[in-house]
Amino acid sequence: KHADIDEVVAIGPPIMMKFCAETTRAHGIKTMVSLNPIMVDGTGMCGGCRVSVGEGIKFACVDGPDFDGHQVDFDELMSRLARFKEDERQSLESWQHECRMMNQEVRG
């Protein structure tokens, strides 16, 4: 354990926070992570921001977004974040297709 490090705060991509927490766990250093899962309503009612922390379920929008990094199930979190990747790609593609003409000069 590093005597001069009492706590680590990790904010960034889930994969980075996961390995930061794994690194500090070996040294017994308290590690807080700030999660940014999918959030829809901000009240916890939709469950979109659900994350497993320790033995329980938390909702990042009302219980977080900061949690003990040693208790977060990062594999589940990353799986949930990837769930809509294809839908997001298709939506972006559709949006770009529809908006492309907005940048064209109108010719008469």
Image: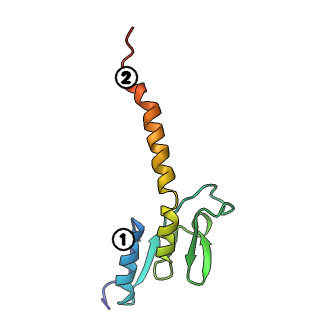
Camera-side residue of 41 and 105 = 105
The single residue placed furthest to the right in the displayed view is: 45
Q: Quadrant of the C terminus?
A: top left
Quadrant including the N terminus: bottom left
| Mark 2 or mark 1, earlier in chain | 1
* x and y, in percent, of residue 80 in the image: 52, 66
Locate residue 54 relative to residue 105 in the image: left or right. Answer: right
Name above or below for residue 94 compared with residue 19: above
Q: What residue type is disc 2 on?
A: Gln
Seen at 45% across and 76% down, the residue is 32
State how many labels appear: 2
Question: Could you say which disc has been placed on residue 16 in the image?
Answer: 1
Residue 95 is labelled as none
**Residue at coordinates 38% horizontally, 26% vertically from top-left?**
103
Q: Residues within 10 Å of mark 1 (few under 14, many from 20)?
A: few
Mark nearer the viewer, 2 or 1: 2
Disc 2 is placed on an element classified as: loop
Amino acid type shown at disc 1: Met
Residue farthest top in this picture: 108
The x, y position of residue 98, in whole percent, is 47, 32
Q: Can residue 50 be seen in this view?
A: yes
The residue under label 2 is 104
